[in-house]
Image: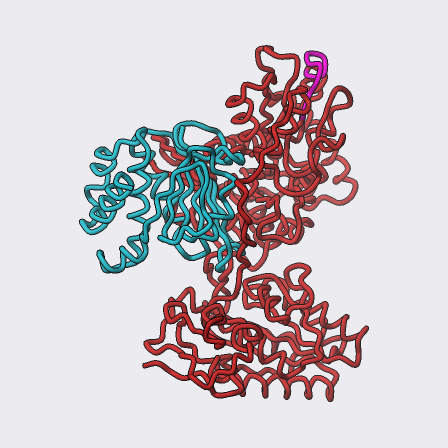
Chain colours: A red, B cyan
């Protein structure tokens, strides 16, 4: 008996466990991260792995599923970009056991670079995709995805949006988990090692299967009560359901569980039965593109093409379509304070590393990467942020276009192993005179402290750099500001003299993970002249300006006692409170 | 149905409070659905969760439709006030309600300070706010809720009871 108030991510993991999944693979990324950790929680006896990146995770899940086993693979949507190569290929070969890929989207976006829709990948790779509307629905549709994957021998995608992953809902079930389903590989070169000739045949077979699958799983037409219908999938369906019910709007509502492949007969029938159809889905018009007449949605401009859908947007769009006047909702007349921006934690080792970069190369270019340390943007020490691993490649190429500027890029430890190593190897081969600062906090902090490769004791960042061909590798403790600045200066000198990348590893374990708290805290002394450096340039969240005193002020409950601000203060106006 | 917003800044315990309320609602036999923000938003940034108790397929609350807001800071209360309906209730973890007024009820209590002074641990502020929330709504059976919590440490239950009493006396 399982009973509780569960996250969508937890219920998808539970469904995978109940379906008989033998092995689960993932790379962390908001909003998908809790899927694998929940699988580990529900099924500690089964195999699970935090893979180095999403491409590896997907290939591992596929390799076992090709061998007849049941597997789960989880990632966020930008991770699916990394995994796109195996995705398209495995869609053709199919699987022998069952494989479900959960790709979590982030409309908004809240914690991502893009608002891309994983269902577009499903369409172009020709992979069936389910779009759950809330956590309980995510449990049901994940189970269904395994059933379909096994029955049609295809990998199947489940695409939850952030509001499904990170919604909680009460749920209970008496279902017992199916035993782990394990197969063994049966050789078939025409399928598993298909040459282009066989690939065409696999494609043809896939197309036929998709048509049958679409017809067998067509959305159910409701009993007709209104002349207008909302056709919706995912969280947009859940919101539309609540809005239509509470305001009694004149729409029938049709839920689409599987946006692709969508049954053609269903589309024709819906267009015949209703005078008007509004399609609600996030974030691209995947379902909507199947309709040709009587339909309103993103393609007609009714629904905004960017940002997260909200209950208010849906309410207004439906009222507009129904010709019901929209009442202007004014806020309560208060000035709304600006939202607080996320910041590096007090005592974070990344902060002094960024500060040292600004001191070592004030005119430098600082390509950044994806993780907590993207927040180095608050210290003006992150100039670019493109995608996982792009800090090192950007450093190489930006140096080529800006030869007179020192270039120091920053990359976290988990990101370094994700896609950093290949970029670093390329920089060595192509003689890039750059400094790569590896910000090593010994965990994947932003997504909830998942493990990192070098803490296994099997490999170190230093060894990986050496293996990539880097000759100059220095490791420093960022809490020592002077040593950090000197290490960077020497690394820049080495890079410029030798036409080769140099690596500086800033190693300090994550203070939030370890809940680091020194018994002593820093304190502002009377000789503070409010030069603003400690709270503005060093940007420590424990320090702010005290207006009445015209001095800086330290919040002792927030200060963890890293004492770096003592080294930052030019006037020796910060001391230690014992 | 009861619906509302719980807000504060990252690290204050917004998500924990949300989970406590949802779990308790489940225990009371009511359906509950809530939505949270994680990740980048959690490093000291503004955090808000939305929750519906009683019915609903989605957790999203429309502007002007929330029955309550629980806010751990005054600024986040101001930011989320547009979600509160007329006659709703704002539960505020601070006695400073400067510039907050309108056609709604305010329960302002220094839960963090009280938790620290009276119960010796500021972490118990969440229990006090949970109590204040329970005390506000007739639809929620306080005695049954306390019965569900009976296996929790006594100090936690005392903190919840303190919250319930203060919700009623204000």
Q: Nearer the viewer, residue B122 or A34?
A: B122
The residue shown at (32%, 36%) is B136
The residue shown at (42%, 57%) is B11
Q: Does the stretch in magenta take in A241?
A: no
Depicted A358 relative to depicted A141: above or below: below
Q: Quadrant of the C terminus of chain B?
A: top left
Depicted B153 relative to depicted A489: above or below: above
Read off the magenta span.
A270-278
Q: Nearer the viewer, residue A395 or A146?
A: A395
On the image, the x and y values in percent for residue A294 come to 75, 19
Picture quadrant of residue A560: bottom left
How many circles with numbers are drawn on the protein?
0
In-image side of A414 versus B97 (left or right) = right
On the image, the x and y values in percent for residue A339 come to 55, 54
Q: Nearer the viewer, residue A529 or A506?
A: A529
On the image, the x and y values in percent for residue A286 come to 69, 33
Judge whether residue A462 can be spotted in this image: no
Q: Residue furthest right?
A: A401
Q: Does the stretch in magenta take in A271?
A: yes
Depicted A524 relative to depicted A137: above or below: below
Judge whether residue B21 can be spotted in this image: yes
The residue shown at (68%, 49%) is A84
On the image, the x and y values in percent for residue A32 come to 53, 48
């Amino acid at each position: 008996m399982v009973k509780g108030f569960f996250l969508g991510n937890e219920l998808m993991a539970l469904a995978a466990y109940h379906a008989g999944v033998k092995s689960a693979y993932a790379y962390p990324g908001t909003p998908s991260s809790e899927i694998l950790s929940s699988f580990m929680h529900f099924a500690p006896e089964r195999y699970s792995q935090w893979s180095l990146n999403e491409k590896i995770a997907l290939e591992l899940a596929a390799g076992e599923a090709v061998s007849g086993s049941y597997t789960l693979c989880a990632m966020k949507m930008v991770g699916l970009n990394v995994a796109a190569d195996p995705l398209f290929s495995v869609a053709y070969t199919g699987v022998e056991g069952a494989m479900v890929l959960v790709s979590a989207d982030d409309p908004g976006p809240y914690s991502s670079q893009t608002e891309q829709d994983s269902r577009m990948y499903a369409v172009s790779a020709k992979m069936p995709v389910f779009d759950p509307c809330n956590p309980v629905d995510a449990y049901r549709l994940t189970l269904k995805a395994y059933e379909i994957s096994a029955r049609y021998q295809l990998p199947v995608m489940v695409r939850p949006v952030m509001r499904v992953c990170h919604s909680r809902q009460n749920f209970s079930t008496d279902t017992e988990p199916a035993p782990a389903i394990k197969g063994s590989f049966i050789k078939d070169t025409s399928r598993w090692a298909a040459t282009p000739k066989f690939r065409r045949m696999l494609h043809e077979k896939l197309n036929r299967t998709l048509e049958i699958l679409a017809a067998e799983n067509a959305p159910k037409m409701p009993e007709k009560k209104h002349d207008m219908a909302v056709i919706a999938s995912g969280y947009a369906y859940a919101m539309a359901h609540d809005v239509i019910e509470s305001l009694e709007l004149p729409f029938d509502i049709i839920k689409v569980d599987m946006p692709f492949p969508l049954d053609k007969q269903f589309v024709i029938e819906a267009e015949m039965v209703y005078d008007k159809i509004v399609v609600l889905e996030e974030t691209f018009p995947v379902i909507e593109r199947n309709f040709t007449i009587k339909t309103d949605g993103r393609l007609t401009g009714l629904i905004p093409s960017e940002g997260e859908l909200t209950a208010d947007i849906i309410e207004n769009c439906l009222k507009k379509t129904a010709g019901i006047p929209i009442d202007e909702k004014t806020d309560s007349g208060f000035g709304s304070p600006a939202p607080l921006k996320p910041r590096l934690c007090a005592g974070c080792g990344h902060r002094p590393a960024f500060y040292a970069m600004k001191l070592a190369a004030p005119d430098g270019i600082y390509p950044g990467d994806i993780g907590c340390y993207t927040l180095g943007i608050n210290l003006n020490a992150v100039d670019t942020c493109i995608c996982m691993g792009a800090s090192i490649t950007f450093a190489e190429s930006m140096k080529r276009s800006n030869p007179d500027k020192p270039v120091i890029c920053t990359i976290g430890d988990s990101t370094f192993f994700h896609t950093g190593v290949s970029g670093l190897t390329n920089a060595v081969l192509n003689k890039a005179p750059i400094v790569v600062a590896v910000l090593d906090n010994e965990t994947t902090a932003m997504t909830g402290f998942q493990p990192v490769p070098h803490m296994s004791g099997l490999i170190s960042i230093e060894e990986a750099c050496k293996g990539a061909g880097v000759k100059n590798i220095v490791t420093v403790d960022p809490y020592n500001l002077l040593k950090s600045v000197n290490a960077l200066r020497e690394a820049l000198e080495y890079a410029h003299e030798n036409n080769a990348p140099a690596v500086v590893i800033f190693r300090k374990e994550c203070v939030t993970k370890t809940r680091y708290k020194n018994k002593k805290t820093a304190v502002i002394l009377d000789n503070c002249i409010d030069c603003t450096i400690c709270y503005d340039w060093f940007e420590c969240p424990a320090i702010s300006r005290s207006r009445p005193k015209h001095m800086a002020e330290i919040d002792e409950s927030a200060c963890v006692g890293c004492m770096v601000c003592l080294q930052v203060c030019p006037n020796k106006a910060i001391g230690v409170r014992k | 149905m009861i619906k509302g917003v719980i807000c504060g800044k990252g690290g204050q315990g917004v998500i924990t409070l949300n989970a406590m309320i949802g779990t308790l609602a489940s225990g009371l036999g009511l359906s509950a659905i809530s939505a949270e923000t994680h990740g980048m938003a959690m490093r000291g940034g503004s955090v808000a969760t939305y929750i519906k108790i009683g019915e609903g397929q989605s957790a999203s609350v429309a502007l002007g439709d929330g029955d309550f807001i629980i806010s751990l800071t005054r600024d986040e209360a101001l930011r989320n006030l547009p979600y509160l309906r007329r006659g709703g209730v704002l539960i505020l973890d601070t006695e400073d309600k400067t510039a907050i007024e309108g056609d709604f009820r305010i329960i302002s209590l220094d839960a963090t300070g009280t938790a620290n002074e009276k119960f010796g641990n500021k972490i118990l502020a969440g229990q006090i706010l949970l109590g204040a929330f329970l005390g506000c709504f007739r639809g929620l059976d306080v005695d049954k809720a306390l019965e569900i919590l009976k296996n929790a440490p006594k100090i936690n239950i005392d903190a919840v009871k303190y919250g319930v009493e203060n919700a009623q006396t204000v």
